């Protein structure tokens, strides 16, 4: 039996702000239970929904030394779908309306969490052999482990894996402040370790002190080794050689299943002879529900995601007037993010209420309906470590239109009209007109080659994006370390 502990700042079903939560909360359950015991440790945020908080079992408490402070930590436990979750309790750090707030608060919060994870292992009834950390919030775990806890009997043989879900966020703060908050020795705040352009950098620490580093797609693992994609750390990644690799994410196929999804309007499966009619029933229902005219001939495009530059919202904004004024399309948009994009969408929703519906906010239910009901799903990201929405769309027969970057490149094969192959539409350059050209190409297939469109829908629904293949690769990595 191999014991693994995931340390993450979020995981479904307990707390979620993005794709990290989906991965940290679903991957553990897919490991072979006879050979792996994979558990998860999270902060016990007070903003976690009450229904989850009430089932937590108190195990013990201890104190965490953080510089000159001595901070309380409670350790709680819960079971979900056969997976054990641990929670670190401290309301000073994990209070507030959301998991993340201002960077200097988050720095101290996650320095505390990182150290508390190691202290918790010393107190828990479980002895992990692998500690698998995710993103900058847990970047200091390997740093503490390989320095302050180097000689600890329960921790000294622990191996660490660090997974980067998004290199854009690195947890940076000024050196002195970080040294004070973390209580880490002074030599670590130099260019060979945590220092980065005059600041301290948690993610860099995680990369340097972990035994293996992974990203969530092979293409992204290659991109971060280049100056364009490396966010200043490309040299470090190039030097990691084969101790850095990319493993593509899967999705929770139980949650995203058009045959059983409880919130979509009509169930369907790739084996249905009347798949197209059933997809249309969903489209009609979404048009009705969102107040857009019911019209099967409008090419309905879904957009779900964080409204940031990363997701390509600036090139969408650039083309939206032209696309909407053409009258060919309808858009169903869901997400929150930068004010300027929210305002931009609100503006167009006011100008073209029959062509675009916008929900600023977060709704799992509406997201599922959009995935199930649209003809196409647009995701023209500037960069994309993996991306989950394009995968989910494919499962619902909604054709992805993506830019060829990171995980989008690894999960969507460009449609080839000559060989009648491919699983979506894609374009190479981050350019609004190139995106629009690709949308027009998809539109043409949809309107004028209906059989081909249907064949494409069936092809994407048959793709295997379950966790099984990724789990095997993670298992291999763990074995390599042991
Ligand atoms: C981050 C990335 C996204 C990835 C997810 C889960 O949210 O931006 O591309 O799919 O993490 O790994």
Image (cartoon, rainbow, N blue to C red):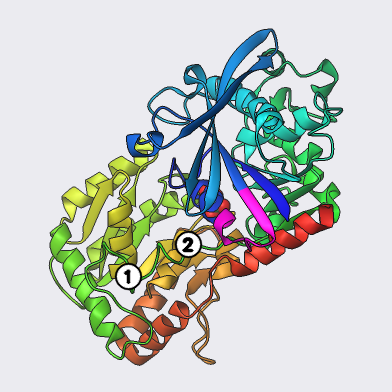
Q: Quadrant of residue 439?
A: bottom left
Disc 2 crowd rating (10 Å Cα; few below 14, some 14-19, many 20+) is some
The stretch in magenta equals 27-38
Name the image quarter holding residue 411.
bottom right
Q: Is residue 18 magenta?
A: no
Taking the image as shown, residue 233 lies to the left or right of residue 303, namely right
Left or right, 223 with respect to 376, comes to right
Q: Does 126 sit above or below residue 261? A: above
- Labels 2 & 1 near each other (Cβ < 8 A): no
Badge 1 marks a residue whose secondary structure is loop
| Residue at image location 32% in from the left, 87% down from the top | 272
Q: Position of residue 415 (x, y in %)?
A: 50, 81
Secondary structure at numbered mark 2 = loop
At a point 33% along the width and 52% down the height, the residue shown is 364
**Residue 139 spot, x, y in % from top left:** 68, 35
Residue drawn at (30%, 49%) of the image: 363
Residue 250 appears at what percent x and percent y?
Answer: 55, 63
Write down the residue under mark 2: 252
Q: Is residue 224 visible?
A: no
- In front of the other: 443 or 460: 460
Count of number-bearing discs: 2
Point out which mark residue 260 bears.
1
> Which residue is at a point 50% across and 50% down the rendered structure image?
19
| Residue 322 x %, y % | 30, 61
Q: Is residue 125 left or right of residue 43?
A: right
57 is higher (above) or lower (below) than 182: below
Is 35 one of the magenta-colored residues? yes
Q: CA distance from mark 2 to mark 1?
A: 13 Å
Q: Is mark 1 within 8 Å of ligand 1?
A: no
The residue positioned farthest toward the top in the image shown: 68
**Closest to the observer, 252 or 198:** 252
Q: Visible in this render: residue 264?
A: yes
């Amino acid at each position: 039996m191999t014991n693994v502990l995931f340390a993450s700042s979020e995981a479904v079903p307990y707390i979620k702000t993005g794709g990290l939560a989906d991965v940290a909360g679903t991957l553990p359950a897919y490991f072979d239970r006879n050979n792996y015991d994979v558990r998860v440790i999270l902060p016990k945020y007070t903003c976690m929904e009450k229904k989850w908080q009430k089932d937590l079992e108190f195990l013990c408490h201890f104190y965490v030394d953080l510089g000159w402070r001595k901070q309380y930590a409670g350790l709680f436990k819960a079971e979900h779908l056969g997976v054990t979750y641990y929670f670190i309790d401290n309301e000073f750090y994990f209070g507030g309306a959301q998991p993340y707030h201002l960077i200097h608060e988050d720095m101290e919060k996650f320095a505390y969490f990182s150290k508390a994870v190691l202290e918790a292992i010393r107190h828990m009834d479980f002895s992990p052999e692998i500690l698998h950390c995710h993103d900058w919030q847990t970047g200091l775990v390997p740093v503490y482990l390989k320095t302050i806890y180097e000689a600890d009997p329960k921790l000294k043989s622990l191996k660490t894996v660090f997974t980067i879900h998004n290199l854009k966020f690195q947890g940076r703060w000024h050196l002195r402040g970080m040294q004070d908050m973390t209580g880490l020795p002074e030599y670590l705040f130099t260019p060979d370790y945590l220092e980065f352009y005059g600041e301290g950098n948690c993610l860099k620490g995680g990369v340097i002190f972990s035994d293996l580093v992974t990203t969530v797609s092979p293409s992204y693992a290659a991109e971060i080794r280049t100056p364009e994609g490396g966010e200043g750390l490309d040299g470090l990644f190039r030097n990691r050689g084969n101790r850095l690799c990319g493993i593509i994410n899967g999705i929770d196929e139980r949650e995203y299943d058009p045959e059983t999804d409880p919130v979509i309007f009509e169930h369907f499966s790739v084996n249905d002879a009347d798949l197209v009619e059933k997809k249309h029933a969903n489209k009609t229902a979404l048009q009705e529900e969102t107040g857009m005219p019911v019209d099967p001939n409008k090419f309905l495009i879904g957009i779900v995601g964080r409204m940031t530059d990363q997701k390509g919202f600036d090139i969408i904004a650039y083309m939206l007037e032209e696309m909407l004024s053409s009258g060919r399309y309808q858009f169903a948009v869901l997400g929150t993010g930068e004010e300027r994009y929210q305002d931009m969408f609100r503006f167009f929703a006011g100008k073209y209420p029959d062509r675009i519906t916008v929900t600023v906010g977060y709704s799992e239910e509406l997201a599922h309906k959009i995935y199930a009901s649209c003809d196409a799903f647009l995701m023209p990201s500037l960069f994309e470590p993996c991306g989950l929405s394009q995968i989910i769309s494919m499962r619902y027969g909604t054709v992805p239109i993506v830019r060829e970057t990171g995980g989008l490149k690894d999960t969507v094969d460009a449609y080839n009209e000559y060989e009648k192959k491919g699983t979506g539409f894609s374009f190479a350059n981050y350019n609004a007109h190139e995106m629009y050209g690709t949308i027009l190409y998809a539109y043409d297939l949809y309107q004028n080659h209906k059989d081909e469109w249907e064949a494409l829908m069936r092809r994407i629904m048959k793709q295997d994006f379950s966790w099984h293949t990724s789990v095997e690769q993670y298992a291999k990595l763990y074995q390599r370390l042991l």
